[in-house]
Amino acid sequence: MSKYFIIRRKTGICTIPFQIRMVSLFLLILWIFISGCASIFSKSNYPISINSNPDSAGVLITDKMGTEIYKGSTPAIAYLKASEGYFKKASYRIKISKAGYNEMLIPIEFKIDGWYWGNIIFGGMIGMLVIDPATGAMFKLENDYVHETLTQTEARFNEPHLKIIGMEEIPFEWKAHLVQLEE
């Protein structure tokens, strides 16, 4: 067997030493087995844009365990990790609140990234079973924005108001203190 690999071109003959061929082959095999397809084409942290109507509402993002991930006000951009561990997709809950308005709770979920399946062709088993699951790149954010319109609460405690209720709604203990009004 020859120490050189001969390539014929139109301009002449080029020889590539055996060692360079082996190193090139080794690097190609290494690239195939240690690369994760989703790790190359995707990311592990995703920005999410949070807006509300009205502006300046409080934003609190918590993870599955209730740990605070982000606290701020709208409009806001928060960065969320796609994974909570090896083969575990992350999920979050966004609470948007403002005084005088009902609070909103919005679940944020991640799904499997389509590039993860590219490991079958490009990334190999190591990319599919180790790299992408370990980095979290196998998951992708479903929606990268949240826009919620808050509704005003019915009760406004700082405004005087009159509420008419029936006798059956009054607690028994209060009935002894009632005064009948004349017509």
Image (cartoon, rainbow, N blue to C red):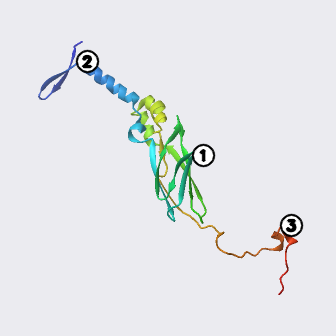
**Considering depth in this image, is 88 or 169 the residue closer to the camera?**
169
- Measured in 3D between alpha carbons, the distance from the residue under mark 3 to the one under mark 2, in whole angstroms, is 97 Å
Image quarter hosting the C terminus: bottom right
Residue at numbered disc 1: 66
Q: SS class of the residue under badge 3? A: helix
Local crowd size for mark 2, using a 10 Å CA cut-off: few (<14), some (14–19), many (≥20):
few
Earlier-in-chain disc, 3 versus 2? 2
> Where's residue 34, x and y in %?
40, 29
Image point 26% across, 21% down: which residue? 21
Q: Which mark is residue 173?
A: 3
> Where's residue 62, x and y in %?
56, 48
Q: Answer left or right for 47 relative to 158.
A: left
In the displayed orientation, state which residue is furthest to the bottom: 183
Asked whether the residues under the numbered discs 1 and 3 touch, taking CB atoms below 8 Å apart as contact, a structural biologist would say: no
Asked whether the residues under the numbered discs 3 and 2 touch, taking CB atoms below 8 Å apart as contact, a structural biologist would say: no
Image point 42% across, 38% down: which residue? 38
Residue at numbered disc 2: 19
Earlier-in-chain disc, 2 versus 1? 2
Mark 2 or 1: in front is 1
**Considering depth in this image, is 84 or 3 the residue closer to the camera?**
84
Measured along the vertical axis of the image, is residue 157 above or below residue 29? below
Image point 45% across, 43% down: which residue? 45
Q: Amino acid at mark 1?
A: Gly
- Measured in 3D between alpha carbons, the distance from the residue under mark 2 to the one under mark 1, in whole angstroms, is 56 Å
Q: SS class of the residue under badge 1? A: loop
> Where's residue 105, x and y in %?
59, 55
Q: Which mark is residue 176?
A: none
Figure quadrant of residue 167: bottom right
In the displayed orientation, state which residue is furthest to the right: 176
